[in-house]
Amino acid sequence: MSTYTYKAWNDKGEVVRGSLQAANEEEISLKLKKEGLLLTEIAEFKDSVATASEIYSIKLPSDVLNLFYIQFTNLLQSGLSIIKSLEIMVNQTQNKKLKMVLKQLIHLVEGGQNLSSALTHFPKTFPKLFINIVKAGEASGKLENALARFTVFSNQQQELKKKMQGALIYPCILIISAIGVILFIVSSIIPQFYTIFIKAEITLPYPTQILNFVGVFLTSYWLLLLAGLGAFIIGLILFSKTELGKGYFDYFKLHTPLIGNLYKKMTFTRFSLTIGTLVESGVPILKSLDIVKEVLDNKILAKIITRCRNSVESGEKIADSLKSSAYFPRDLVEMLSVGEESGSIDKTMFKVGELYLIETEFLIKKITTLIEPVLMLFIGSIICFILISLLLPIFDLIGLMSR
């Protein structure tokens, strides 16, 4: 038995699309004829159940998804149907994984499912936030507007992520280069000088002895050190995926000096913009809190939002529930309270989110500006120590030769 997608006309002259399982195309034609449908197009859907399950598990990079959101929204806003928009994107995209996902989406929608229901088959591909935005847009009849707002939100998050990554590129290159040069000097050059000093029977100062010990240790046990470092990193990654480990890491993110402040700014930017986007799209506030809890991806903040959701369900206001939290900023809570009083949570949260976005970008620049001289000072100190360790015995050697 194979699955076929078809396009047919009914007795009212309306186009009917769907999918059926049959042994061949003739059997599909007979089935449709019995139902009073005239078959016009038919194609075998070649993906098996196993292949379909693999497609449902596809993960796509955020930049690919971002481009999909933009193109899909533009096509819908131009007046095209969902299926036609997806078909155009299948023909245009160069990404093989996205192409497979879109073909499967078309198959599901042609089979009678609405877009939000079809998207739920792809929990690893599309974020829950996007699926709920689509669902709310379908319910309100304003899918294009809901997607347009989500696209803006997604672009803001992507730009913020890129700025953060861009700010880290130079310090990372500087650190890696410095470590490489220092390791080369300590493991290759220092031992050669040490041999000369020993032959000259010079009493080596402590800095030179320490430096030589480090060089010999690295040369002798580099493989063991590399294996240990690899084991430590793998262990750290595995630990971070456990419930206990994730709790520790989430606490660390919130409390680390300077970096913790940046993390909180980025998190509350995401919180504000997510709440605003969901409420504007028509998602109920309780459902919005459930979604934003997953979007923030922090166990400590998730507990606070869960308590907040339960309080709101009992009749309390969101702002009143969050006031007792030590993590949520006072200005955010006060603005949220204003939004609740005026009945415009979405507009208020967008303003708060945009303000936090500006503050986050400023903080990224500040940290980048601060981290460069600190790194240079640290690397310079290490190089100075190496130079002193080399020069002290050289001066002794020169003094010995001049006698």
Image: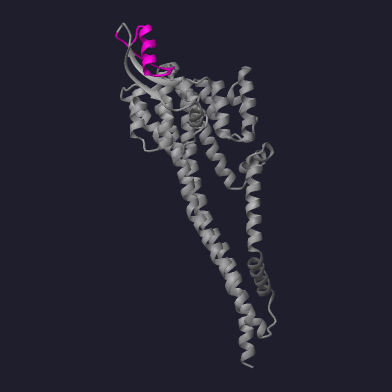
Q: Magenta stretch: give its range.
A: 13-37
Q: Residue at x 54, y 40 (%)?
A: 265
Q: Position of residue 128 (x, y in %)?
A: 52, 28
Q: Residue at x 68, y 83 (%)?
A: 202
Q: Position of residue 174 (x, y in %)?
A: 51, 59
Please tell me in which quadrant of the rendered image residue 72 appears: top left
Q: Position of residue 150 (x, y in %)?
A: 44, 29
Please tell me in which quadrant of the rendered image residue 33 appears: top left
Q: Residue at x 65, y 51 (%)?
A: 231
Q: Position of residue 349 (x, y in %)?
A: 49, 29
Q: Across the whole image, how many numbered discs are drawn on residues?
A: 0
Residue 201 visible in the displayed image: yes
Residue 142 visible in the displayed image: no
The colour scheme used to paint the residues is one colour
Q: Measured along the vertical axis of the image, is residue 64 above or below residue 286? A: below
Please tell me in which quadrant of the rendered image residue 145 appears: top left
Q: Residue furthest bottom?
A: 403
In the image, 107 versus 128, the foreground residue is 107
In the image, 151 versus 58, the foreground residue is 58
In the image, 374 versus 296, the foreground residue is 296
Q: Measured along the vertical axis of the image, is residue 382 above or below residue 99? A: below
Q: Quadrant of the C terminus?
A: bottom right
Is 393 a magenta residue?
A: no
Is 30 a magenta residue?
A: yes
